[in-house]
């Protein structure tokens, strides 16, 4: 794992970390070097990574995976770091983009696809900027939130870490009533100047708006699911197969949201009731804004056939715009990212699917491209090992690793395969440095 990040002196530092399974079968991730980087090209960073590994007297032949974020200098198939590493080591070293970073990017793209959804985040950012710009305003809000459990802790939404945005959305929802009171009080108080009062009133009008309240209700659940996914993907003990299952289950959950309109309609109903607490008639406002406009017959011979949407259909369509983009990008990433490591799925399958061809593909992912691994011997080991426990045992992948470690004298190839599965990188250095 490697990534560049600026330090307090505004110089770019390259942080290099390794992920490995130690002699006690514990999964470790360790930063081994932080150094200044002068050449930020893929070739320059690749040279620096390889020289660092050599200087630390680590075996470059044991480098089996690469994990960086998805910037072009890292991800390009021609001039990116991952391509240059493979070129310099004269073998293909599979590259998996940081999955947490990719997921955050997909959420950002999906929200930007819909004006109403992106407006929610813009309003939250306005709240942060306004409240944090003055100690007087900050103190007033804190005094109102003091007795609310899990109340709002302001986050700057300009951060790239979407976990902060997810937390802000959830906590804003919990604290919304007090926030509205705070902005109303500022807009009416003589303790604040006219400019501040006008700003507070303008933001208040954006908050007590049916579009904002209903869309906030709808997207907070979607973003919460992706936050759970990114949190899981950053766990050190996570292995590649379990990561794939977590990503798949998240996609399936989002697809259920996309198909089941009834649940979405219930959320819209709940949001409409919340609107009424602020004396907002969401249904009337919707009807006024979206009243049916009959087209003159000179333009349309059958104006009575004009389609009309009710409030539930309208907001469901807005949410679906976000979901469609998010699901599409996550599926596309899943296909591209996991293609090179698909042979690992062999470690989860029934022994009936253990063909020599599949085993040979897995051998090629092992250090030295499986030169020291006999595919036929490994096939026999794997078949016997998998038959030592029944379906009722329901062992996790981590438990299988421990079991193969305990029996590595009998199943050396199997232990090597499970060890390799747990060495696969899923996150970039930014996530380490941020935590």
Image: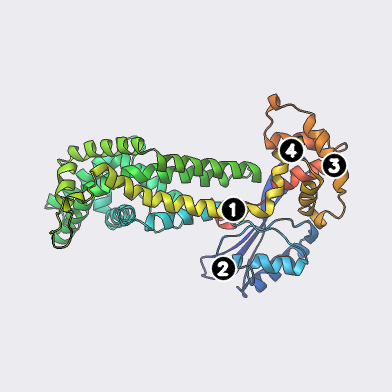
Mark 4 / mark 1, whichever is N-terminal? 1
Please indicate whether residue 208 sits to the left or right of residue 365 in the image: left
Identify the image quadrant of residue 199.
bottom left
Are the residues flagged by discs 4 and 2 in contact, CB closer than 8 Å?
Answer: no
In-front residue for pair 308/407: 308
**Percent x, y for residue 225?**
46, 42
Structural distance between the alpha carbons of marks 3 and 1: 31 Å
Mark 2 / mark 3, whichever is N-terminal? 2
Are the residues flagged by discs 2 and 3 in contact, CB closer than 8 Å?
Answer: no
**Percent x, y for residue 238?**
63, 43
In-front residue for pair 34/289: 289
Asked if one can make out residue 329 in the rendered structure from this viewpoint, the answer is: yes
Structural distance between the alpha carbons of marks 4 and 3: 12 Å
**Percent x, y for residue 160?**
45, 58
In-front residue for pair 164/274: 274
Question: What residue is drawn where x is 79% and y is 36%?
Answer: 404
Are the residues flagged by discs 4 and 3 in contact, CB closer than 8 Å?
Answer: no
Numbered tag placed on residue 401 in the rendering: 4
Please indicate whether residue 418 sits to the left or right of residue 161 in the image: right
Residue to which mark 2 is pinned: 72
Numbered tag placed on residue 84 in the rendering: none
Residue to which mark 3 is pinned: 412
Question: What residue is drawn where x is 80% and y is 41%?
Answer: 414
Q: What element carries label 3?
A: helix
Residue to which mark 1 is pinned: 335
Mark 3 / mark 1, whichever is N-terminal? 1
Asked if one can make out residue 239 in the rendered structure from this viewpoint, the answer is: no
């Amino acid at each position: 794992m490697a990534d560049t990040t600026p330090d307090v002196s505004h110089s770019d530092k390259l942080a290099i970390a390794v992920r490995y399974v130690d002699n006690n079968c514990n999964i470790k991730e360790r930063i081994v070097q932080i150094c200044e980087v002068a050449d930020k090209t893929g070739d320059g960073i690749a040279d620096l990574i390889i020289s660092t590994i050599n200087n630390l007297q680590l075996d470059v032949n044991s480098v089996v995976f690469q994990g960086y974020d998805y910037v072009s200098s890292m991800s390009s198939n021609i001039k990116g770091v991952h391509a240059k590493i493979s070129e310099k080591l004269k073998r293909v070293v599979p590259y998996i983009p940081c999955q947490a970073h990719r997921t955050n990017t997909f959420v950002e793209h999906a929200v930007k696809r819909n004006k109403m959804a992106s407006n929610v985040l813009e309003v939250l950012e306005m709240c942060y900027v306004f409240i944090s710009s003055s100690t007087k305003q900050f103190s007033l809000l804190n005094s109102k939130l003091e007795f609310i459990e899990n109340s709002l802790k302001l986050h700057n939404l300009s951060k790239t870490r979407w976990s902060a945005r997810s937390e802000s959305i959830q906590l804003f929802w919990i604290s919304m009533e007090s926030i509205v009171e705070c902005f109303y009080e500022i807009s009416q108080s003589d303790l604040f100047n006219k400019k501040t009062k006008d700003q507070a009133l303008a933001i208040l009008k954006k908050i007590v708006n049916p579009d904002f309240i209903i869309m906030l209700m709808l997207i907070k659940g979607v973003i919460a699911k992706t936050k759970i996914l990114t949190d899981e993907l950053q766990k050190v003990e996570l292995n590649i197969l379990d990561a794939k299952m977590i990503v798949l289950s998240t996609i399936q959950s989002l697809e259920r949201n996309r198909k089941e309109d009834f649940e979405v309609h219930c959320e819209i109903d709940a949001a409409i009731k919340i609107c009424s607490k602020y004396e907002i008639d969401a249904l009337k406002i919707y009807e006024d804004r979206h009243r049916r406009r009959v087209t003159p017959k000179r333009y349309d011979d059958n104006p009575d056939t004009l389609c009309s949407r009710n409030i539930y259909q309208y907001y469901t369509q807005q949410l679906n715009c976000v979901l469609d983009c998010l699901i599409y990008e996550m599926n596309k990433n899943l296909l591209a990212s996991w293609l090179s490591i698909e042979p690992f799925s062999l470690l989860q399958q029934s022994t009936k699917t253990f063909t020599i061809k599949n085993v040979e593909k897995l051998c090629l992912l092992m250090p030295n491209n499986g030169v020291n691994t006999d595919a036929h011997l490994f096939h026999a080991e794997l078949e016997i090992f998998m038959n030592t426990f029944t379906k009722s045992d329901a062992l996790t992948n981590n438990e299988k690793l421990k079991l193969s470690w305990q029996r590595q004298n009998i199943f050396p190839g199997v232990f090597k395969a499970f060890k390799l599965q747990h060495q696969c990188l899923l996150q970039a250095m930014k996530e380490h440095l941020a935590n």
